[in-house]
Image (cartoon, rainbow, N blue to C red):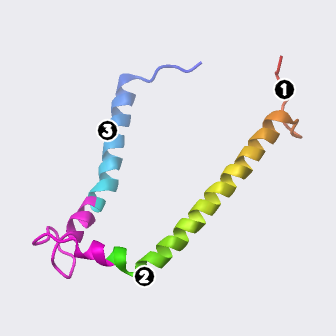
Amino acid sequence: MVRSVPLLGRILAIVLGVIVTLYMLVPLMVVAGASVGENRFLTFPGQGFTLDWYVEALTSDTYLEPFRLSLLVGITVAILAAAIGTAAALALTRFQVPGAPPSRRC
């Protein structure tokens, strides 16, 4: 049976979760904020506001071709993983696996 977690443990877990979340998101916000600036080099906060970098990235074959390839590989791997995982789950639940404890089915 699972015992309840003490109040201090829950508070520490929440504080740790907030710290880790901020540690992960603050650099992302800095880069995103700098990416919409008009400067050619990375500055934060940037002067002005422009989406030119995004327009260039979304219209250039230099960026789009690797994105298409990554998307194709990702979709293929996801489909294969789902098929293999489903087959493995069915096999593990329907058949006796060597070395496994005896089943407790009624």
Q: Residue at x 54, y 73 (%)?
A: 69
Q: CA distance from mark 3 to mark 1?
A: 42 Å
Q: In the figure, is residue 87 to the left or right of 24?
A: right
Left or right for 10, reference 93: left
* Residue 103, disc: 1
Residue 33 falls in image quadrant: bottom left
Mark 2 vs 1, N-terminal side: 2
Amino acid at dot 1: Ser
Quarter occupied by the N terminus: top right
Q: Residues within 10 Å of mark 3 (few under 14, many from 20)?
A: few
Q: Is residue 54 magenta?
A: yes
What's the magenta region? 29-56
Instruction: Name the spot of residue 54 as percent of width and height, x first.
Output: 29, 72
* Among the two numbered marks 3 and 2 on one chain, the one whose residue lies closer to the N terminus: 3
Q: Are marks 2 and 1 in contact (CB under 8 Å)?
A: no
> What mark, if any, has residue 94 been given in the picture?
none
Q: Which residue in the protein does label 3 denote?
A: 15
